[in-house]
Image (cartoon, rainbow, N blue to C red):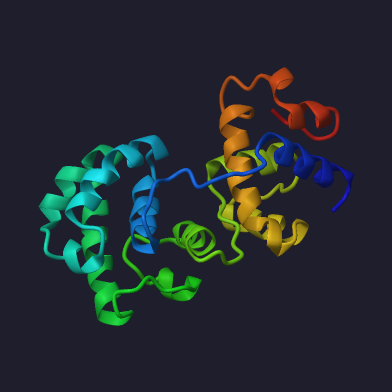
Amino acid sequence: MNQKELFICQTLDRLFPNPTPTLDFRDRYTLLIAVLLSAHSTDRMVNRVTPALFERASDPQTMITLSVDEILAIVRPCGLGPKKAQAIWDLSHQLLDHFGGEVPDNLEDLETLAGVGHKTASVVLCQGFGLPAFPVDTHIQRCAQRWGLSRKKSPSAIEGDLKKIFPKRMWARLHLQIIYYARTHCPAKKHFLAGCPICQEFVGGFLDN
């Protein structure tokens, strides 16, 4: 890593030395469901909704005993309710039919599940299995571009750039640290430069916003 990248890591370590997942979950299955629900929603809303859902069903065997409409009645506040409710029901069947009821531990299999894209699968790998992955959401995309770590536009391309810069052992930690940093210091709107230590440090070099 160069001096800029080292400064970023040091700043994140100072501000967020022990980052923890932002979604509440009990195990890998409930993590998978929570991450699926978080698409186009907020973690706060998901954490408000999932206790009621997991009280009814916290494993695929129980989830498929619910109707899609019963699932929808609970998850609707997360947005895209009908699509997400159907995906939860479908992926629960897939887990039982193809994976012995267990959440698979690799991207290829995870991405075959209903409603599970690359980012969701990556979050499950790093937070559920402790495997190296670097999920890129809108927060990480914004910071990576502002900090000059990537000039790419797509999340997958930005992920590739970040993986080249930082060693695997740091990926999962940085994923969480950057999300926390983006929410508290580097928002998409009303970005206060003086309150953003990383952007402030490098404003002369590469900050676009």
Total marks shown come to: 0
Q: Is residue 28 visible?
A: yes
Residue 135, compared with residue 204, is above or below; it is below
Q: Nearer the viewer, residue 80 or 179?
A: 179
> Residue 118 location in percent, x, y?
48, 62
Measuring 67% from the left and 60% from the top, which residue is drawn there?
Answer: 160
Percent across and percent down for residue 199 are 75, 30
Q: Residue at x 80, y 35 (%)?
A: 206
Q: Nearer the viewer, residue 168 or 109?
A: 168
Would residue 154 be found to the left or right of residue 38 on screen?
right
Residue at horizontal 42%, vertical 70%?
110
> In the rendering, at what x and y percent does residue 80 appear?
27, 45
Quarter holding residue 86: bottom left
Q: Is residue 141 visible?
A: no
155 versus 183 height, above or below: below
In this image, 202 relative to 14: left or right?
right
**Side (left or right) of 16 relative to 93:** right
Q: Is 12 placed above or below 201 here? A: below
Of 49 and 149, which appears nearest the observer? 49
Q: Which residue is situated farthest in the right direction here?
A: 3
Instruction: Give the quadrant of the C terminus.
Output: top right
User: In screen coordinates, is 157 left or right of 108?
Assistant: right
Residue 197 spot, x, y in % from top left: 75, 27
Residue 15, quarter of picture: top right
Residue at 22%, 71% in the rendered image: 93
